């Protein structure tokens, strides 16, 4: 186990070997709940390391694409079994490096397990289409073909689940991979890689290069040997990724920010809505792209909702996520904490009323980490910056509204479109909401978080660029349709002409 005195030194995984970064530099991985705890040292990779990983992936692709998909899937199945065995250890590692509470990190590992089993099952499906031809003695079909080398850049908030959303469908479709995980949470990706390596993936099929974005991520973007790129992170970096991929026509998948809302109608089960708003707003310390950072509440129940919501938030126990009593962990790093603190000032200056929280937590052991109070602003209006911009921290803005139409307008009045939720017992309003909310995901009587792996995940507007991950939709990104015609008539038959 890593200690402060003898930190474990981790390596990149290139062509089936664990290797140091060429530059010999490392990045510290520290516990955000206790900055004195060094979790490990990881390579600070650069362009040369990325190129070596890309070369390995390109070379391995020649064979991997020809391995029958059910055989590829057997390796995934074995990896899933390993993850099941090590779930508790991997969850504890994740809490140490990322800060979220143990029940949530167990969920993160479980999501990777679910995704790995799901895609293992796809090894025997990946169905295509067979269609009748318009010409006699001709056969027509469309099959899924692998694409090549897939580059992946992942964030720190779901350090095992998100890499698995990308890695598993890419592998089962027959692509090879270069993955650059977030610099704040490399250990969880290391653990995932270890499981896949032990499951028997051939050398070069999965390559992992640790390091920061500009040094170890950016070199993938314009590399002509990287055929597709999947990115999850901020909208600002997503824009850089999209632009850098354009000149080489890379297929590019972007999963970016969110400013998600829970709408509470006057006929809602208020207790349930409050429970949902607490979990949606403060689960993962609000550091989910699907976090419910806005709550719109009907004026008829506004007073009661605010009173009970604030009361419940006041009781949230903040601390180290390994403690079973903790309900909310720290922010991931100092920068994120500062961002949260600056948005608290912005909220106050905009005239939002601070109902609870608003400060960094620094008493006792909390001083060693990046903790912030769960914070609620009330009496907000939808146009305020705290209701428009993604904060990615434990800050919820409560917005009163008068009618269903107004609620939908507030919900849609942001530049993001990931997730939205409505609490109501009126089935007509629930159906109208799921039709009219401009988000990729809609929940009824549940908060904005809680995606399941076998359904598509992604958003509209500045959240995404039209692709989806997870579910069968993931196969559409990691494979290409190949249409195949067999003419067994022994003569020239011209489509559209001879069939007339
Ligand atoms: P977050 O706010 O969640 O940290 P970022 O968008 O900054 O989101 O980071 C998400 C991922 O993108 C991380 O793996 C990070 O290292 C990477 N990244 C950051 N900047 C760049 C860049 N210029 N090029 C490529 N990858 C980057």
Image (spheres, helix red, strand yellow):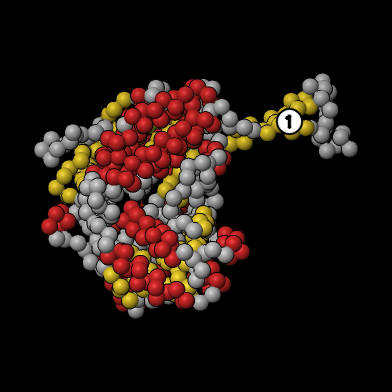
- Res. 182 in view: no
Query: Relative to residue 498, is residue 105 depicted above or below?
Result: below
Which quadrant of the figure contains the C terminus? top right
Query: Relative to residue 162, is residue 259 depicted above or below?
Result: below
Q: Residue furthest left?
A: 5
Q: Which is nearer the eye, 159 or 275?
A: 275
Taking 122 as reference, is 330 left or right?
Answer: left
User: Where is residue 121 drawn, in percent x and y?
Assistant: 52, 30
Query: Relative to residue 290, is residue 357 depicted above or below?
Result: below
User: Where is residue 356 drawn, in percent x and y?
Assistant: 28, 70
Q: Which is nearer the eye, 74 or 216?
A: 74
User: Where is residue 216 drawn, in percent x and y?
Assistant: 33, 42
Q: Which residue is rendered at x = 44% and y = 25% of the image?
A: 75
Q: Residue furthest right?
A: 500
- Res. 194 in view: yes
- Residue holding disc 1: 140
Dot 1 alpha-carbon crowd within 10 angstroms: few under 14, some 14 to 19, many 20 or more: some
Taking 129 as reference, is 447 left or right?
Answer: left
Q: Which is nearer the eye, 64 or 71?
A: 71
Taking 431 as reference, is 267 left or right?
Answer: left
Q: Which residue is rendered at x = 36% and y = 32% of the image?
A: 83
Q: Quadrant of residue 404?
A: bottom right
User: Where is residue 324 drawn, in percent x and y?
Assistant: 24, 47
Q: Which residue is rendered at x = 36% and y = 46% of the image?
A: 158
Q: Secondary structure at mark 1?
A: strand
Q: Residue furthest bottom?
A: 351
Which quadrant of the figure contains the N terminus? top left
Q: Which residue is rendered at x = 17% and y = 42% of the image?
A: 38
């Amino acid at each position: 186990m890593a200690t402060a005195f003898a930190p474990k030194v981790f390596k990149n995984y290139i062509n089936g070997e664990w290797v140091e970064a060429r530059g010999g530099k490392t990045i510290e991985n520290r516990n955000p709940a206790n900055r004195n705890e060094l979790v490990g040292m990881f390579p600070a990779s650069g362009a040369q390391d990325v190129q070596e990983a890309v070369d390995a992936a390109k070379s391995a692709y020649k064979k991997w694409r020809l391995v029958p998909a059910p055989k590829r899937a057997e390796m995934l199945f074995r990896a899933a079994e390993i993850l099941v065995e090590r779930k508790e250890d991997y969850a504890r590692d994740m809490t140490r490096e990322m800060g979220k509470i143990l029940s949530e990190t167990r969920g993160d590992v479980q999501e990777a397990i679910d995704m790995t089993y799901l895609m293992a099952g796809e090894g025997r499906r990946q169905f295509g289409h067979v269609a009748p031809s318009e010409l006699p003695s001709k056969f027509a079909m469309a099959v899924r073909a692998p694409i090549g080398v897939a580059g992946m850049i992942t964030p720190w908030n779901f350090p095992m689940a998100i890499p698995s959303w990308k890695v598993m469908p890419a592998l089962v479709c027959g692509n090879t991979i270069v993955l650059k995980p977030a610099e704040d949470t490399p250990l969880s990706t290391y653990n995932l890689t270890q499981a896949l390596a032990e499951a028997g993936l051939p050398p070069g099929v999965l390559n992992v290069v640790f390091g920061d974005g500009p040094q170890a991520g950016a070199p993938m973007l314009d590399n002509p040997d990287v055929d597709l790129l999947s990115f999850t992170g901020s909208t600002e970096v997503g824009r850089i990724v999209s632009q850098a991929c354009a000149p080489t026509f890379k297929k590019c998948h972007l999963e970016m920010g969110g400013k998600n809302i829970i709408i509470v109608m006057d006929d809602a089960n208020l207790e349930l809505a409050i429970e949902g708003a607490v979990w949606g707003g403060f689960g993962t310390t609000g550091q989910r792209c699907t976090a419910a950072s806005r709550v719109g509440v009907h004026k008829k129940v506004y007073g009661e909702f605010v009173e009970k919501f604030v009361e419940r938030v006041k009781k949230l126990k903040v601390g180290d996520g390994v403690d079973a009593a903790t309900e909310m962990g720290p922010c991931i790093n100092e920068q994120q904490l500062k961002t949260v603190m600056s948005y608290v000032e912005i909220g106050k200056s905009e005239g939002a009323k601070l109902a609870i929280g608003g400060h960094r937590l620094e008493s006792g052991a909390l001083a060693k980490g990046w903790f912030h109070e769960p914070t609620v602003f009330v009496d907000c209006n939808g146009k305020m910056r705290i209701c428009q911009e993604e904060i990615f921290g434990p800050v919820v803005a409560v917005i009163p509204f008068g009618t269903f139409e107004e609620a939908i307008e507030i919900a849609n009045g942001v530049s993001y479109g990931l997730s939205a939720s409505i609490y109501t017992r009126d089935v007509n309003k629930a159906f109208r909401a799921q039709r009219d909310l401009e988000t990729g995901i809609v929940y009824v009587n549940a908060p904005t978080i809680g995606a399941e792996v076998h359904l598509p995940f992604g958003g509209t507007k500045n959240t995404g660029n039209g692709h989806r991950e997870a579910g069968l939709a993931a196969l559409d990104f990691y494979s290409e349709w190949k249409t195949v015609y067999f003419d067994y008539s022994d003569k020239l038959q011209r489509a559209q002409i001879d069939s007339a």
